[in-house]
Amino acid sequence: MDFEDISSKSDNYVEDEYEDIDTGRYDYDNDDVYEDIPLAKKKQLTDEYIAEKTATSLAPYKTRKKKLKHKLLKELGLAFLVIILCFGIAIFSLINKINNASSKEERINSHITEDELYYSSDVTNILLLGVDAREGETSSRSDTMMLISIDRAHKKIKLTSFLRDSYVEIPGKGWNKLNASCSKGGVNLVCDTIEYNYKIKIDNYMLVNFQAFEKLIDLLGGVDVEITEKEANYLNKTWHRWSLTGNELHFDSGEAVHINGEQALMFCRIRKLDSDFKRTERQRRTISAIKTKLMRSNPIELMNIASKILPLIETDLTLAEITKLGANALFSYLRYDIVSQSIPADGTWHSEMKTCGSSLVFDLKKNTEILKNFIYFDEYDGKTEENTK
């Protein structure tokens, strides 16, 4: 079958016989139709004809373009709406996975009045408790007691580590180590004890099993922390005492050593190598590394992490508070600097043997002032401050 080359076929037309309406070129002198019409009138009629034809040919195109533009904007708007709704539903479903205790009776500290507690609307204090308890238990001793203060006035996240061996008065239970308050009365008594002794308002709490801590770091692909040679040597000699998997673990020393969840948990729980101060410092160092990794994660990765971690957390935060906190964290809090403080502060305590064992006896009045100035007035004792960008 032969095919005709329509691209080269000629229509046998004479180009000069056609008017170019785009430019208005026309031979008025040789046109018989316009023979008896003055030249000026000829040009007027021709110009009107050209204008009419041009408007007719362009109008549909402009209308189609305008309609297409509105259609694209409408579809784009619907796409964004779908994305927002999907993320909203996903976030709501994640929040509902939290072991929420807000439906329980509101915590009221009967051992101290509200007027005695220092408070600021610019600061939110959330007590983070890390415990060894199995799922559903809250009565074991708290291994980590850290107050997370979100200071919106100074745009900082302030981490206060309460040393667990601090010798304090546990309301209604007598004098003991601070970490004993968890086993004697659960998370509420821990909050009451800190408020009673240090006179600062605790807004909410989060109770985290160490399983969540380990899993979070593994989901992040590990974290980079500074490990001294002394710490590495100790961990390499004692890892078998802590490992639940039985897998041999090795620790290197350096400024940025990459460790997994199990290694990080062992690192944070070193007890006999040095002091409680160093132990809480290692915990704060690891939390700073976690923050750095979270900031580098995209929203999809964060949603995946949250879906696996939130069921392992118990909190008295309401769903509305969690939603607000999460949104603010995403758009502002994660960009805040992190500073830290230990209580009792260095130089304000001494070790002393009590009936509950070796304890830290300290100047309560001085530490109460240090804590208040740190949280609310952005002042430090000059010895335990740690900045993290």
Image (cartoon, helix red, strand yellow):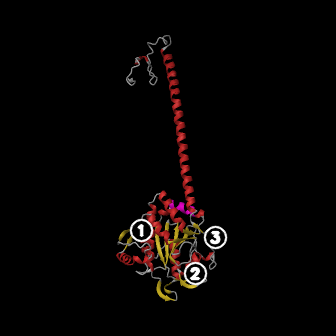
Name the residue furthest front.
1
Rendered image: mark on residue 260:
1
Q: Which residue is mark 2?
A: 184
Q: Can you give x and y, in whole percent of width and height, for residue 178 in the image?
A: 53, 81
Residue 152 x %, y %? 53, 65
- What amino acid type should be assigned to the residue bearing mark 3? Lys
Q: Which residues are magenta?
A: 322-331
Circle 1 Cα neighbour tier, 10 Å, few/some/many (<14 / 14–19 / ≥20): some
Q: Which class describes the residues within 10 Å of circle 2: few (<14), some (14-19), or many (20+)?
A: some
Tell me which label, 3 or 2, sits earlier in the chain: 3
Amino acid found under the numbered disc labelled 1: Asn
Residue that badge 3 annotates: 104
Looking at the rendered structure, the secondary structure element under dot 3 is: loop
Residue 302 higher or lower than 384, as above or below: above
* Of callouts 1 and 2, the N-terminal one: 2
Q: Is residue 327 magenta?
A: yes
